[in-house]
Amino acid sequence: MNKILKKIMEIEGVKGVWLVLDGKYSSEIALDLNEEIKDKLDQVVSYCQEIVKSEKLFLGCKAEFDLFMIEVLNNRQYIVIWASDKVDTSILKMELDIIIEENLKNNDSFIKKFKFW
């Protein structure tokens, strides 16, 4: 789980990541924030969790200077990304899909690897 967090945090423009995999919660924020702001961000993420407790879903929300992306893999796995609004969302989504494919899905199949290339 930490490996996935670190890979997502390496994407240019990403400020924070919240990751829930099978009930295990983990987060990482690139900026040095005080506890009150971190708590407010955690509240936003838990609100997002309540919204998307269903099927596969991808949502994006753009604010004045920030962007939030929510990727729901299933009802027990989701990722929330906080990034700069200057980030190209299509590239961010593509990089996120690659990280998910490499780390969360079964890549043992030769056909899957061949099809990816």
Image: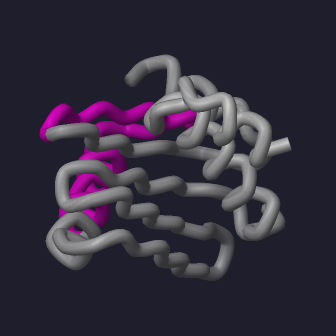
**Residue 113 left/right relative to 25:** right
* Residue 10 position within the rendered picture, expressed as x and y whole percent measured from the top left: 71, 31
The residue lying toward the viewer, choosing from 8 and 77, is 77
* Residue 49 position within the rendered picture, expressed as x and y whole percent measured from the top left: 22, 64
Picture residue at 13% right of the left edge, 39% below the top: 23
Which quarter of the picture shows residue 104? Answer: top left
In the picture, which quadrant includes the C terminus? top right
The residue lying toward the viewer, choosing from 16 and 8, is 8
Picture residue at 27% right of the left edge, 38% below the top: 21
Rendered view: 36 above or below 41:
above
The residue lying toward the viewer, choosing from 44 and 116, is 116
Picture residue at 78% right of the left edge, 38% below the top: 114
Rendered view: 19 above or below 72:
above
* Outermost residue to the top: 3
* Outermost residue to the front: 111
* Residue 33 counted in the magenta span: yes
Q: Read off the magenta span.
A: 23-47
* Residue 50 counted in the magenta span: no
* Residue 68 position within the rendered picture, expressed as x and y whole percent measured from the top left: 52, 67
Count of numbered circles on the image: 0
In the picture, which quadrant includes the N terminus? top left
**Residue 72 left/right relative to 85:** left
Picture residue at 43% right of the left edge, 19% below the top: 2
* Residue 32 position within the rendered picture, expressed as x and y whole percent measured from the top left: 52, 32
